[in-house]
Amino acid sequence: MGKKKEEERKLGDFAIHFTLFHDNVEEIRYPNETQNLINSKTIPQLLWGKCSLSLFLVSAFTKKPKTTEVTAGNTAVFEAETEKSGIKVKWQRAGTEITDSEKYVIKTEGNKHSLTINNVGKEDDVTYAVIAGSSKVKFELKVKEPAESSQNTEVIMMFISVSSAETHPEEPVDPIGLFVARPQDGEVTVGGNITFTAKVAGESLLKKPSVKWFKGKWMDLGSKVGKHLQLHDSYDRNTKVYTFEMEIIEANMTFAGGYRCEVSTKDKFDSSNFSLTVNEAPVSGDLDIRAAFRHQATHPCEGKSESQSDVDVWDILRKAPPTEYEKIAFQYGITDLRGMLKRLKRIKKEEKKSTAFLKKLDPAYQVDKGQKIKLMVEVANPDADVKWLKNGQEIQVSDSLFRYIFEAVGNKRILTINHCSLADDAAYECVVGDEKSFTELFVKEPPILITHPLEDQMVMVGERVEFECEVSEEGATVKWEKDGIELTREETFKYRFKKDGKKQYLIINESTKEDSGHYTVKTNGGVSVAELIVQEKKLEVYQSIADLTVKARDQAVFKCEVSDENVKGIWLKNGKEVIPDERIKISHIGRIHKLTIEDVTPEDEADYSFIPQGFAYNLSAKLQFLEPPKIHLDCLGQSPDTIVVVAGNKLRLDVPVSGDPTPTVIWQKVNKNKILQDTWEDDNGSREWMDYKELLFESEGRVRVEMHEDHCVFIIEGAEKEDEGVYRVILKNPVGEDKADITVKVIDVPDPPEAPTISNIGEDYCTVQWQPPKYDGGQPVLGYILERKKKKSYRWMRLNFDLLKELTYEAKRMIEGVVYEMRIYAVNSIGMSRPSPASQPFMPIAPPSEPTHFTVEDVSDSTVSLKWRPPERIGAGGLDGYMVEYCKDGSTEWIPALPGLTERTSALVKDLVTGDKLYFRIKAVNLAGESAAATIKEPVTVQEILQRPKFWLPRHLRQTLVKKVGETINIVIPFQGKPRPKITWLKDGQTLDSKDVGIRNSSTDTILFIRKAELHHSGAYEVTLQIENMSDKVAITIQIIDKPGPPQNIKLVDVWGFNAALEWSPPQDDGNAQILGYTIQKADKKTMEWYTVFDHYRRTNCIVSDLIMGNDYFFRIFSENLCGLSETAATTKNPAHIQKTGTTYKPPCYKEHDFSEAPKFTHPLVNRSVIAGYNTTLSCAVRGIPKPKIFWFKNKMDLSGDAKYRMFSKQGVLTLEIRKPTPFDGGIYTCKAVNECGEAEIECRLDVRGNQINPMHNPITAMKRD
């Protein structure tokens, strides 16, 4: 069911109220108590007593003017629309009718009506109304004073007055997305006002865009509208621009920061950031919990929005009696009054200094429903654990469902609550040890807004009254008032309140005279007021005034008869009272009222009304003045101008006409003696036709005439050459006749030229020629446009942007080898012709360039190996192959070196004579021919070249190669030498087994391959390169490692208190790698779940602490090397029992043990041989109590003061680092440990090998191979 539209209509002397569902009449209420229901789209005739009247419905407003706020000195525009055109509309100011003047401009265009108020002043801040028949709509104009430039930075909404019918506003250009104008950064002082404006282009939008204002990143300002923030929007129909404003009132320092405006439509989105600077030093102070409950307070009956001081709701509640609590809570939007009063009492006024908290929670927080909030404290101990409680209950992570997020960042502990609801409105605590921090979280519901306000009503005594409004939420609580007094359900049930979803109803079953007044509906977010008028007695109209049609100098008499002869009344002309004079007479005799107008003139044509005093009746009629027909053309009486139309376009001639009665319009084409005829209904409803020899036009078709109230339209759809000529329009009515001539000329685009011809085809160019078109379309040809496309493509590309004046053109920048087509357009002042037929297909092509990098790769006694790279430019013709030729030194004859063409980029020329000197050249060949030749400048001697054998050992193979068991080993060692050398591999001096190890040799490298490495593959490998009596060899060390075995001989040495002592021996199998440490784990005998106690533990004994009394524990130990932990662990056979307290234990008496121990090296220094230039380290391990002092010596010389050496000691591991050693650094190194119990020393030898360079090989080549 559609939305109801309540309207009132007046018919003669009957007042009728009805409700429309779309266009269907649902209910008709008559002046008496009888009510009839009519369910049809047409209302039958209504009989009242002995009078029979036809019922006609007068249209109501489809668009109503709205209350507007304007700065003084600007212009305000109010617009209204009626359902039908021709309805007489009146405008009132403070109950007085407004007449058209320089100050007030009233315009009517069809069903659109507007009131423009120029130079708005403070005196214009009153209530206005618009009246159509008996429908009346009230609205207000609010005038604000312009702010001073030093205090405010305001962007004021401009109201653009309605332009004349001949002026068309320019369409707004939107070069920056949806915004036409973005909000700009602003600056304001504390207490000042500022307005930010955003404008959005609405030309391409189907409906109003959605705009949101944000502060910071997430704070939506839509719910913050109140005393300090106002949001406005408007739409300009002329410029089609939406204007959105955010006004900040009485700014303070907290308003400073970044803001964002977001605009979105169905398929587009745009945003703009801006900032606000508030100038004044911030005032420090503590948080006032009462400020969280301050709201804007405005009187609901005030018409103007005036700034009010902040209201402290807490002080009001404290001073008010308990009976007023609910009223105050409704007025200021408090949703949980009792909970608020109860929780505020628990807030401590003074807080003691905390040792656990650096910063506690604020006394209270406030958040809008659906938003998120963060509660943050700072603790003194960054490792402290905190608990968060809600109403005394701990918040569990598993129950939060991602609504509660717990964060710990340094000393900060943060609780984030997402999507706050009313259930989150509670008391929260943060607990650290024995200390607590309290706060209150208040969740604020959004205000309930009135989306559809109340409407004024006028009824008779005893009729039913129903006020209706719509709010933003279903089931919302509202308050109804009459003249400022709250309405309640009385015992007589006079007032009845009803809720239907978002709609709220106030129903008065039987109205009385005392029910007249102003009714108000209030929510915590808005107020709406409507007026109820109850009429006491009824007036019957026996005869209403009727419309009159008179000629010049005739007499016009309006007459009406009412039931009460004592009733007086006034006559109105277009809303203004008629003043009698010598020509205009007003008489009242008994029940008959007359208005007589002598010698009627055109100025007397108007709407006349009679209004009985004391009654809501308006008897209206229209005086129509007959005038001769008139054609309103600017060129009338002069030589007619020629109207030029482009062939195929639509020609529309709007000819303004006037005349009363409406004249008959006749169109004829003079030069062909054929006429167009169309008629209009006369006053009697009949049609007048004029016969001619042949009808040229009809009311429908390609050429037609459309008739309107004040003009006629001559239309030619798709103009043709035959439509040229002189057209005459003739107007006729009983008063006279008028005519005018109009000349029409039809022009067209030229015919397409013939197909162009192609000549002079090159690599990437060609020449195009063509002939002019046979017909130029009535306008000279201005030039030509040339297009081309690929043969297999459908896309044509334009070659010139400036028109070509000549008949030939050289097309360039084509792709070689691609088949093209060309076509031509001819252009005149009308436009481009259709394209010419395409030219014959053609293809540009050229031979490739010469091959590059042509070199000799190898030479033997009878062959020469050549190699080269493809040409830099191959071309679209492709590459068929290469032609290789040679020429003997001293000869000019080139001999083919290969039979035919080769497609490869290398060639081996065979069967050559040893000792010959030859020149070689190569050419690239394609469809277009041969390229230029690439030639070797110096002759090549056919003779084998001897090259000394040499290995190029990669850098990573110069040190020990470590691999894990099962990994693949692939060693590639490049070498040089000619002729091809002999290669021999040895392991530890023995020949390799071909079944276990794979060896693959080529002319440039040798490869050692092991598919799955095993421990026995570890060792020193040696490879030898042999050519005759010359040789070269290199050595490679391979170490295969595996996971170690478990430790041995694990023992549970002792158990005391909560401790257990363990000892074990190193594993028997170290996996061919050094043992890096051990991992010790424990398990409770009840659960047998293992937990790691120590990892990377280097000693072979340990003490496990923090065991639980009364439990039995097993222990297991894993070994660890470079491969990782051992597969199995050594486990204690018997559990360690931790005795419970209460068992009497008499500790034995022990003598104090002396833990002093002389230094002892637990891991010796190892002799090392290193390469010069690479940093190296010497390491050992020592123990001793007290901690010994360490000294390092080289050849008995102390190294403490030498910067080349760095010494480290970490957990008993001693390291000496030698930076980039040289052969001079070789020698005996000694480590000495000394404490008060003794001393110990250990030594090793360090050999530094020099990086020798073989003088036979080229150093530059060696660097490249590395």
Image (tube, rainbow, N blue to C red):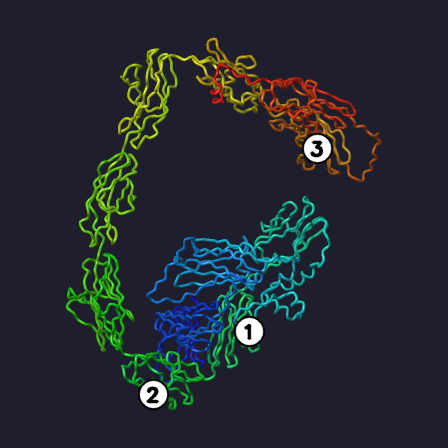
Q: First in sequence, mark 3 or 1: give its number.
A: 1
Expressed as whole percent of the image width and height from the top left, the position of residue 167 reads: 34, 64
Expressed as whole percent of the image width and height from the top left, the position of residue 1238 reads: 78, 23
Residue 888 vertical position relative to residue 188 in the rendered view, above or below: above
Query: As rendered, which of 1119 and 258 lies closer to the eye?
Result: 258
Residue 63 vertical position relative to residue 764 in the rendered view, above or below: below
Picture disc at residue 1056: none
Element under disc 1: strand
- Label 3 vs label 1: CA separation? 83 Å
Per the image, the residue denoted by label 2 is 582
Q: What is the crowding at mark 2: few (fewer than 14 residues within 10 Å), some, or many (at least 20)?
A: few
Tag 3: amino acid: Phe
Residue 619 vertical position relative to residue 190 in the rendered view, above or below: below
Numbered disc in front, either 3 or 2: 2
Expressed as whole percent of the image width and height from the top left, the position of residue 404 reads: 60, 50
Would you identify the image quadrant in which residue 45 lies? bottom left
Query: As rendered, which of 2 and 609 lies closer to the eye?
Result: 609
Tag 1: amino acid: Glu
- Label 1 vs label 2: CA separation? 53 Å
Q: First in sequence, mark 1 or 2: give its number.
A: 1
Q: Is residue 36 visible?
A: no
Side of 218 relative to 53 (left or right): right
Element under disc 3: strand
Picture disc at residue 481: 1
Picture disc at residue 1114: 3
Would you identify the image quadrant in which residue 1097 lies? top right
